[in-house]
Amino acid sequence: MKLWSSLFVKLFIAFWLVTIAILGSWQLTSNYFESQPPGPRFSDRDPGTPPNRFILRTLYNLENLSLEALPNQLAKIQRAHDIQIYLLKKNGNDLLGGKVPQKIRAMSNELRSTPRKSVAKKSKGGLSAIPIYRQDAGALTAVFKFPQHRRLIVNTLSTSLWLRTSLAVLISGLICFSLSRVMTSRLKDLQLASRRLATGELDTRLQVRDRGGDETDELARDFNSMAKQLQERIGAQKRLLVDVSHELRSPLSRLRVALALAQEKPEQRHEYLHRIEQETERLEYLISQLLSSQAQDITLDIRIDLVALLKQLCADANFEAQGTGKHFAFKTNTIRAEVDSSKDLLHKIFDNILRNALQHTKEKSEVDVSITSIDGGYQITVEDQGQGVPENDLNRIFNEFYRVDSARSHASRGHGLGLAIAKRGLLQHGGRVAANNTGTGLIITVHLPAPGKSVL
């Protein structure tokens, strides 16, 4: 997973950007509202506070712009903000020669009549008078006439710090809520899918890309993998239950028949008792095989030489195959191949694999058995000259009660448990097993780790 696709990085960048956006928007809006002219009711500002930025900037221009530039500046302010500005001399006349309304002259006189007064306000009419000084005209009074129709929202925001703060908190909350919703939507889907899976909908899957993405995509893929394995395992358990019932039904039926016949025909009781003994042995063998295929924990407490073990098993298989023309050929590139094991478990495992090859290889054919030393362990192959296995069934041959040819397996008294026992035992040894068609038969490949190593 790339760093930039990590959920941690996404969350970090997202919250960082949100913080920057909040701070930046706060700064911009503060500058914007501070740069706007005050509202029509001047009593909404504390008289002890200084004028806002718009007033200060305007006063600076009124004091420092040239007399020729003043008319354009005043016209520009009136067009942009609908604010009229009068510059009155001590005699009440306008500096630029304009007509002065009586209310404007009265505001100027009110300011001049009160010594040391820095501003005079009149909420009704939207008037404000502020003293200024120009080098070319001396002391003047700047009288502002603000519009009465300024929008309420803009005026309220520009005069209320708490309202601007509350609005910023509300907007940031909405942004963070949307962001959190996007980030947690996959987790919500996972929660709902987990509930469906818990209620028995084993085909529940999440829509996710095959590779890439962030941690939530990896989690979704892991959930799909878990759901698939759970579905397969529960399905396998159901099939196992059906197969066990089927396998036990036949010998039990024969036992019941033999017992009934023994009661009806006392003169042949010995024959029927012998049949009952045979069926009992078959049941005992089947149950033993089932227990072996489901064994869980083992202790690897002894060390076995695979070379010596496979030599002995091949010799036993050749003895058993006399008269069929089948032959086991063994070869190795190492003198010893020691692995950790538990009692005679590896003997049972490879005996099952070799017997499976002996059963399915053609008459007058050779089964090749080899051991190869590889990094970290050993590779054992058993290649027969049989008909192979359908490609779709290569993984299923290690399942309990699987048979490629059911009729032939029943005829040979097989139960389809040998390779299942072998696979489970090899996994308990830290190894693995696989089957592949060669075109001329089937090859079983086993990997086992050397002591202190692990098979990748």
Image: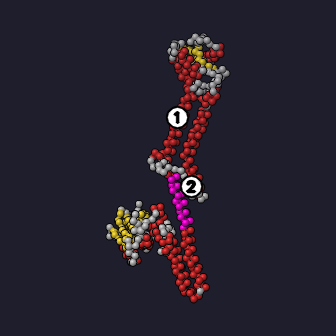
Task: Give the x, y percent position of residue 3.
Answer: 45, 47
Which portion, as a residue range, is magenta?
A: 220-241
Query: What is the distance, in whole Å, between disc 2 and disc 1 at their CAs?
Result: 45 Å
Task: Give the x, y percent position of residue 127.
Answer: 63, 20
Q: Which mark is residue 204?
A: 2
Left or right, 125 with respect to 24, comes to right
Above or below for 157 versus 268: above
Disc 2 residue type (three-letter): Thr
Q: Residues within 10 Å of mark 1 (few under 14, many from 20)?
A: few
Residue drawn 37% across the image and 65% down it: 378
First-in-chain label (2 vs 1):
1
Residue drawn 45% across the image and 49% down it: 1
Regarding residue 309, the answer to whether it shows in the image is no
Is residue 232 within the magenta segment? yes
Choose mark 2 or mark 1, whichever is in front. 2
User: Dot 1: what SS?
Assistant: helix
Dominant SS type (magenta): helix
Q: What color scheme is it? A: secondary structure
Task: Give the x, y percent position of residue 280.
Answer: 54, 79
C-beta proximity under 8 Å, tags 2 and 1: no
Above or below for 110 versus 320: above
Disc 1 residue type (three-letter): Gly
Q: Which residue is mark 1?
A: 24
Q: Nearer the viewer, residue 412 or 230?
A: 412
